[in-house]
Amino acid sequence: MASVPQEALNGENNDDAPQPDEFFWKSPDGLTLAGREWPPSPNANEMHKAPIPVLCLPGLSRNTRDFNEISNFLQRKGHRVIALDYRGRGQSDWDPDWQNYALPIEEKDIDAAIDHLKLKRFALFGTSRGGLHALVLGLRYPVDRMAAVIFNDVGPHIEMRAIHRIAATLGHNMTSATLDGIADVLARTLGPQFPVFGKEDWLKMAAQLASERNGEFVMDYDPALARQFASLDDAAPVPDLWPLYENLSDRPVLILRGEHSDLLSTETCKRMLDVHPNSQLKTINGQGHAPVLWEPDTHETVSEFLSTI
């Protein structure tokens, strides 16, 4: 496992809220998988009902650190917040068979984590790939278990140009002698998605995506993930995910979209709002795929949404 600076793991939590705890569970096929849990703050305001736990699922090559700041904020509101590292990402074991880096396998890992955590009722917060998991999990977890869904820059229709962009960079430029080097790579590859970012923003993102190992900084995922995209075929039929989204119409949905996102289009967002009777959209200005969840107004939007569950 990589060595990660403690401040990058914990986020900027400067009050007396409990620090997050690392936990581990076993996948059905025996891998050791990792997650982080932010216990609710004992100083949270008294409420008529306990705030709902929030289960956070990251993007394709991302890890639990993507949720540091939003988790710190939500725990101060009284939520129990949990984020998972998929196999081959973050602090979880790599899989010797790259073909297991697949949604159906990861779904079984997520089910095992939910059992391990004894989550009876929760809201699902999915960034990109995590949102795709949310669509399928809705079939297995009814509204009395998975009570609400937050989609962070993903929906039932994904723009293929974004998939090709991600495929072109996944597994490349994995190491650098310095964190600045990782930040520079991110700025070059993701600059059009985040045109408002400056040097400090790219360094902050780099600390979320990479950690120090044997004297160099390494991206925290198995580069074999890239093999999932080796045979992209634009002519292949695209699965129709809209019925999965419509299945969530019995529970509230919040859609977060980056203003410059090339993965979640404004047209897809409009249809998501049209077909779901209890959905809402927040556009995050100046950002693309996927929004970094650092901004106070995004924190407030998520918190207000969860307060109604």
Image (spheres, grey):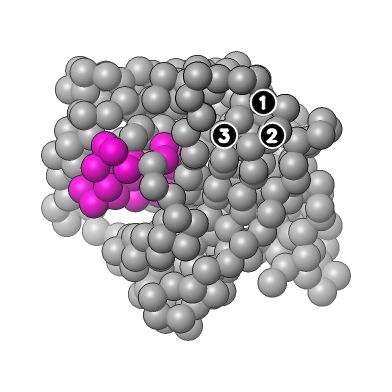
Q: Label 2 sits on what residue type?
A: Ser
Secondary element under disc 1, as helix, strand or loop, is loop
- Range shown magenta: 122-146
- Residue 41 locus on image (x, y percent): 69, 34
Q: Which residue is mark 3?
A: 79
Q: Which residue is mark 2?
A: 41
- Residue 82 locus on image (x, y percent): 55, 47
- The answer for how far apart the CA atoms under marks 3 and 2 are is 8 Å
Q: Quadrant of residue 148?
A: top left
- Check the image and report above or below for 260 versus 104: above
Q: Pick whichever, 51 or 263, lies toward us.
A: 51
Q: Mark 2 and 1 residues: CB-CB less than 8 Å, in contact? A: yes
Magenta-colored stretch includes residue 143:
yes
Q: Which residue is mark 1?
A: 44
- Check the image and report above or below for 65 versus 290: below
Secondary element under disc 2, as helix, strand or loop, is loop
At 81% from the left and 47% from the top, the residue drawn is 7
At 27% from the left and 29% from the top, the residue drawn is 251
Q: Is residue 72 left or right of residue 16?
A: left
- Residue 80 locus on image (x, y percent): 57, 40
- Check the image and report above or below for 133 versus 26: above
- The answer for how far apart the CA atoms under marks 3 and 1 are is 9 Å
Q: Pick whichever, 128 or 47, lies toward us.
A: 47
Q: Label 3 sits on what residue type?
A: His
For disc 1, the neighbor class at 10 Å (few under 14, some 14 to 19, many from 20) is some
For disc 3, the neighbor class at 10 Å (few under 14, some 14 to 19, many from 20) is many
Residue 227 in view = no
For disc 2, the neighbor class at 10 Å (few under 14, some 14 to 19, many from 20) is many
Q: Label 1 sits on what residue type?
A: Ala
